[in-house]
Image: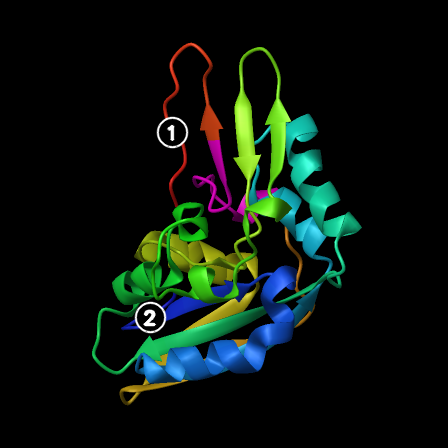
């Protein structure tokens, strides 16, 4: 059982990891408290558990971008609390749009620390045109997603006397069975016949 009063989770992807200090300063200025910071490895393996809505050949395009990039295969998880409340909603807004940050002027995490359009990867066949962006961040959009993200990364959150205590469980194992399908936070999918944006998270 997770008690998640006014917290959220921010995943810093490999392409933004070197800017962690700047990212934390940005968050502190936005009234976030960093309650927990955890480092993880094997991002390109974890991706397969997160972005399970994509066919293998599409996802491989996205993964190859990481393998060919100059970033290490590491990522970071921050557990955050906004002192003004509504942390999940505020963090989702401060995260920024998954692709519009590349052309719109916005004061968001992705606009400041995500990579520009030239790094985008594209998958095209007769039915689909999928654009993958290396936007640097991912966070849950509601409490249910937060709960499953915590479980995915083997983090347990309990509350005692109105103080939050975070416990890192031993021997984390990530399996598809403990992650539910969510829309992608890194891509858009279009149909050539009917160009409808599928994912906007």
In percent of width and height, residue 54 lies at: 57, 31
- Residue at (38%, 84%) from the top-left corner? 28
Question: Which image quarter is the C terminus in?
Answer: top left
Q: Toward which corner of the image does residue 52 lie, by quadrant?
A: top right
157 vs 143, left or right, is right
Check residue 31 in the rendering and tell me which mark sits there, or answer none: none
Relative vertical location of residue 173 with respect to residue 19 in this rendering, above or below: above
* Front position in the image: 43 or 145: 43
Helix, strand or loop at label 1? It is loop
Q: How did the renderer colour the structure?
A: rainbow
Q: Residues within 10 Å of mark 1 (few under 14, many from 20)?
A: few
The residue singled out by tag 2 in the image is 3
- Residue at (54%, 34%) from the top-left corner? 131
Check residue 197 in the rendering and tell me which mark sits there, or answer none: 1
In percent of width and height, residue 113 lies at: 51, 65
The numbered mark, 1 or 2, whose residue comes first in the sequence reads 2
Q: Toward which corner of the image does residue 111 lie, by quadrant?
A: bottom left
Helix, strand or loop at label 2? It is loop
90 vs 101, left or right, is left
The total number of labels drawn is 2
Magenta span dominant secondary structure? loop
Decide if residue 169 is in sight here: no
Q: Residues within 10 Å of mark 2 (few under 14, many from 20)?
A: few
Query: Which span is picked out in magenta?
Result: 176-188
Q: Nearer the viewer, mark 1 or mark 2?
A: 1
């Amino acid at each position: 059982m997770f008690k998640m009063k006014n917290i959220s989770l921010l995943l810093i992807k490999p392409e933004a990891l070197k800017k962690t200090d700047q990212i934390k300063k940005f968050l502190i200025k936005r009234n976030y408290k960093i309650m927990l910071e955890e480092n993880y490895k094997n991002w390109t393996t974890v991706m397969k558990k997160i972005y399970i809505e994509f066919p293998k050949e599409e996802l491989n395009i996205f993964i190859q971008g990481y393998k060919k990039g100059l970033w290490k295969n590491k990522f970071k998880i921050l557990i955050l609390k906004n002192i003004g409340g509504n942390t999940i909603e505020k963090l989702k807004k401060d995260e920024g749009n998954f692709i519009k940050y590349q052309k719109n002027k916005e004061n968001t995490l992705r606009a400041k620390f995500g990579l520009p359009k030239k790094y985008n990867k594209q998958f095209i066949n007769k039915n689909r045109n999928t654009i993958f962006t290396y936007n640097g961040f991912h966070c849950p959009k509601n409490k249910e997603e937060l709960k499953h993200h915590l479980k995915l990364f083997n983090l347990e959150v309990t509350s005692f006397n109105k103080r939050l205590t975070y416990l890192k469980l031993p021997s984390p194992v990530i399996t598809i069975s403990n992650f539910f399908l969510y829309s992608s936070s890194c891509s858009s999918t279009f149909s050539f016949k009917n160009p409808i944006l599928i994912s906007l998270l």
